[in-house]
Amino acid sequence: MPDFDMLVIGSGPGGQKAAIAAAKLGRRVAVVDRPDMVGGVSIHTGTIPSKTLREAVLYLTGLTQRDLYGQSYRLKDDITVADLTARTQHVVSREVDVIRSQLSRNHVSLFAGTGRFVDAHTVALREVTGHERLLSAENIIIATGTRPARPDSVEFDGRTIMDSDNVLDLEHVPRSMVIVGAGVIGMEYASMFAALGSKVTVVERRAGMLDMCDIEVIEALKYHLRDLAVTFRFGETVAAVERHPRGTLTVLESGKKIPADAVMYSAGRQGLTDELDLGKAGLTADRRGRITVDEHYRTEVPHIYAVGDVIGFPALAATSMEQGRAAAYHACGEPVGQMQNLQPIGIYTIPEISFVGRTEDQLTEESVPFEVGVSRYRELARGQIIGDSHGMLKLLVSSEDRTLLGVHCFGSGATELIHIGQTVMGCGGTVDYLVDAVFNYPTLAESYKVAALDATNKLRQIDHIGD
């Protein structure tokens, strides 16, 4: 008889939710993770510290209050790294406590160490002492996550040339910084350091950034970041990064040279599978360390599942949690609903971006007729009260059946606001529901009613043009 019904390798959002879901179903569950990484990358170097850092930056710089109190407004003039990390350390330690408590409360055994496969049902646990012990399980879930990908041509030192993991260990706020890669992580950190007063240059191979987002939203973000003295170098490739006594020099293939105190690479992520000995379990990973799964998160070996960033897109804490729960239910023979395609995306730039459903470009490409309803925060009382005159909410409404096809939000509270649109879409509601609904006043949520009225007024004009 195996030691456990389910063994989970990794305690990040996916692994943790899988373990707790199986425990709630009465199974004997164990989780393996490094003692310093309980909660996974999400809690230690990813989602939680970066979003906490952003909150600290917004608070200490007073950036969001400058529309009200003038451009010279600062809550603290000389912001140190210690000011920023105090809040991060507090939140991280509290979150780790919450996870440890949840696991122990649900009688999940937590083993400190790293795991590697011995065979398809057995994992060798290497403890910190170097001692190894074998753990066997009927079902195994791989939730090992990812690490930042590092180009071989670059000499990382973690101090002046770093990836998104080291950026939290900076000794001081750099006066100037080059960020290589205009993906989600790159743009979030570009926003933060620009808000702190660093002169940021973003270098990106592609012609644009965040191409999954609405074009109007991206243009608004670019405008904002340029206002904070961010320089964009699109269509440019880094040839070399040189370290000098007085900083770094980034040399581009086009011949441009960019001096800066620090360089941060945000060049995608690599699955943490190289030390798992996947071959012993009959598994393989692609060149980026990712594992292929079916719609139930099963690998090629039916009793071994994989969830979270290690399986690739969308690689979000929110989706990983749901994947973990779904995999655990399937492994335990418990019915589970399919995850809806309406997964919201939240990007914590400054200001933040969030959307659900399709973009205008996608709908145009698919020849789906739609009308646009827009609400601008500057026209909402709550927008004036909080000093956000740039935010906006955009509804894409079907001209045929008046359902919502996409919701795009930019500005304060965007990642919270999006859930109203997500719920209406998930329940098959129409724009008329939002027109007739009463929202608290003054709130940002009222933007849904304003945008819905904007869209329906346009639809009415089309309907009445032939009258």
Image: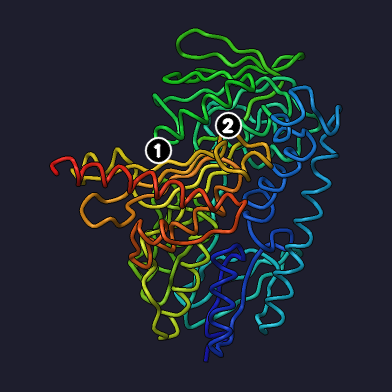
Q: Secondary structure at mark 1?
A: loop
Q: Is residue 197 above or below residue 299?
A: above
Mark nearer the viewer, 1 or 2: 1
Left or right of 147? Residue 280 is left
Q: What's under tag 1, amino acid-wise? A: Asp
Q: CA distance from mark 1 to mark 2?
A: 25 Å
> Residue 265: which numbered mark, if any?
2
Provide residue 87's location: percent of width, then percent of height: 80, 48
Q: Is residue 277 visible?
A: no
Q: Is residue 135 visible?
A: yes
Provide residue 342's location: percent of width, then percent of height: 39, 59
Decide: few, some or many residues near mark 2? Use Cα within 10 Å; few <14, some 14-19, many ≥20.
Answer: many
Quarter of the image for residue 336 reads bottom left
Question: Residue under circle 1?
Answer: 214
Instruction: Between residue 334 and residue 284, name the one nearer to us.
Output: 334
Provide residue 37's location: percent of width, then percent of height: 69, 59
